[in-house]
Image (spheres, rainbow, N blue to C red):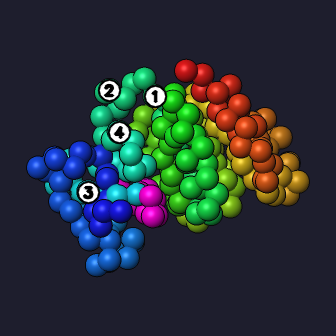
Amino acid sequence: MNDVLGVGCRPDDAQSVPIKRSLLSSREILEGARVPRFCALDEKLDLAVRRPGQSALVARDGLKSLASPVEEKKKKVVVIGEDDEPIAVLLRDAISDEPAYQAVVVADGALVLETVRQVHADLLILDIMMPGLNGLEVYDRVREDATIRDMPVLFVSANLPQFEGEFKRRKITSVLTKPFDLNDLLERVRTLCPQ
């Protein structure tokens, strides 16, 4: 694996500024380098930071960059708001392995809206229990924002009974209970966000 992580620019991009993973923690990398904090750093990601004033987005290793949504118009972009890293990686990989989709992980609920706008998301998958804003608070803000209110949202939750009243009050029907079968998840993604 490279020590440099792929964030929205090709390896040959002269504008990228490499940062060694081993030098800083993920939060320091994200804040100190001014990379959007929605970047999920894990073993499958590489990071290259564009100079100030240029956008930088995370793409799974081996995928084309999300930095140019126009070039990637064929693929639908799915933003996953999930702070449990093993689940987030599983969801991201399963969705990104589908030819029609590309997934971005956001571990902090407070950063989901920024990410959705920046990557021009076609679908949002939310966990309820996240740091920053919980999934229901994120959902409310999505529905209040005229530019993204019509975007489909799928909840994945292990606490469905606890939040059933909240789902009913908001008329949320797209919910998968954890643990779930990945085939069920992919079927929901295809239904909510057809190619």
Tell me if residue 178 comes above or below residue 94 in the rendering. Answer: below
The C terminus lies in quadrant: top right
Identify the residue at horizontal 39%, vertical 24% (top origin). Answer: 73
User: What segment carries the magenta color?
Assistant: 36-44
Q: Nearer the viewer, mark 3 or mark 4?
A: 4
| Mark 3, residue position | 48
The amino acid type found where label 4 is placed reads: Lys
Viewer-closest of 86 and 30: 86
- The reply to whether the C-beta atoms of the residues labelled 2 and 4 are less than 8 Å apart is no
**Left or right of 136, for residue 33:** left
| Of the image marks 2 and 4, the number of the one nearer the N terminus | 4
Q: Please report the residue visible at 85 percent of the width from the left and 48 percent of the height from the top.
A: 165
Looking at the image, do the residues carrying marks 1 and 4 touch, with CB atoms under 8 Å apart? Answer: no
**Which secondary structure, mark 1?**
loop
- Amino acid at circle 2: Val
Name the residue carrying label 1.
75
Say which mark, if any, is on residue 51. none
Label at residue 70: 2
